[in-house]
Image (spheres, helix red, strand yellow):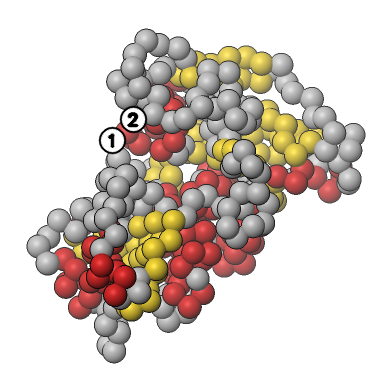
Amino acid sequence: MSKAVFLGKAEGKPGKVYYPLAVQTLSQPTPQGSELLVKLSAAALNHRDVFLRQHLYPGLTFDVPLGADGVGTVVGAGPDVRNPGQWQGKRVILNPGVGWKDSLEGPEDPTGYKIMGGTKVYSKGTLQEYITIEESEVEEAPEHLSDAEAAAVPLAGLTGWRALVVKAGEQNSGKGASVLITGIGGGVALFALLFAVARGADVYVTSSSEEKIKKSIELGAKGGVNYKENGWEKKLLSLLPKGKKNFDAVIDGAGGDSIEKSVRLLKAGGVLSIYGMTVSPVMPFLMQAVLKNIDVRGSTMGSRKEFKDMVEFIKTHKVRPVVSRVVQAELSDVAALDGLFQDMKDSKQFGKLVIEFGKPSGSKL
């Protein structure tokens, strides 16, 4: 049997409702065709999981387990798996979405990219004990990572990788480049920080929290400023290395006045890579940005190829994801899982929030 966590039903309008978590006991799935059977051991939360509970995410369903991030051990294989022996007992992380193979532009599937967990467009989710998944959709987990760290990688890591490496490009995010990452503290921003530091870039951050700025510096950032301070843009530019007047790239998840700020911060022809718009879904495109040849690039998730590239980079450079809190509990412990959700709702985390299954109850900071 396999326990799994779903959205429970409740009355309420989108944005006002907060669906409870419902645990169901399912039959252990049998791998078909070229599928692997994976016994999951840890899963991480993302903001989309909270949005689903608030009915603020499209396509939600009560019939698919929640969760897009997961790690586990292969314990079975379908009849068409090419070499079952190579997978048996291997620890793997799951590609969080399907429909996007290797195109730089976006998903090849005409119906779009489909992310795991809680929606009717993809029947898989990682908040369950056993899952079947195509062998082409897993990567062997980096050996240097714990289960909690490996579970933290997929969705945020892939999003951060594309926003920084693919969209900002080598020249603007590699060795010697100056990169600004706004709103540090969330999973995507922290992965962008870790990747940029490992690539040899000079990284700077913004936050409203001095503690988060301090932690970012401990992770390799050269400095940071509180964006609530008057004149923070000038202060940030003053931190750049001697001879450097502007940033090469800004990696932003807020939207709002990002273009206006980037006009002052970026070099001519610099890149503003936007992976989210948490402040505002609308951004004015200013004439100053046109005159300065600022390149604004939208970025979301990433392809199967980019997922593989990202995992290989983590292995090679021994990158360790930032995990804010780990709860060790059975999936049936709804109260423990609800506590992680509350952390995310309250924006308390600095890094990823993870649940490890089948271990004694408790939590690790």
Dot 1 falls on a residue whose secondary structure is loop
The residue under the point 40% across, 18% down is 19
Give the CA distance from mark 1 to mark 2.
6 Å
Determine whether label 1 and label 2 are within 8 Å by CB: yes
In the image, which disc is placed on residue 342? 2
In the image, which disc is placed on residue 327? none
The residue under the point 85% across, 33% down is 33
> Disc count in the image?
2
Where is residue 104? Give x, y as percent.
Answer: 60, 60
Dot 2 falls on a residue whose secondary structure is helix
Where is residue 271? Give x, y as percent.
Answer: 39, 69
Residue located farthest toward the bottom when viewing the structure as drawn:
243
| Horizontal side of residue 36 vs 219, given as left or right | right
**Residue labelled with disc 1:** 346
In the displayed structure, would residue 52 be above or below residue 10? below
Q: Locate the C terminus by quadrant.
A: top left
Q: Locate the N terminus by quadrant.
A: top right
Q: Return the residue nearer the eye: 229 or 250.
A: 250
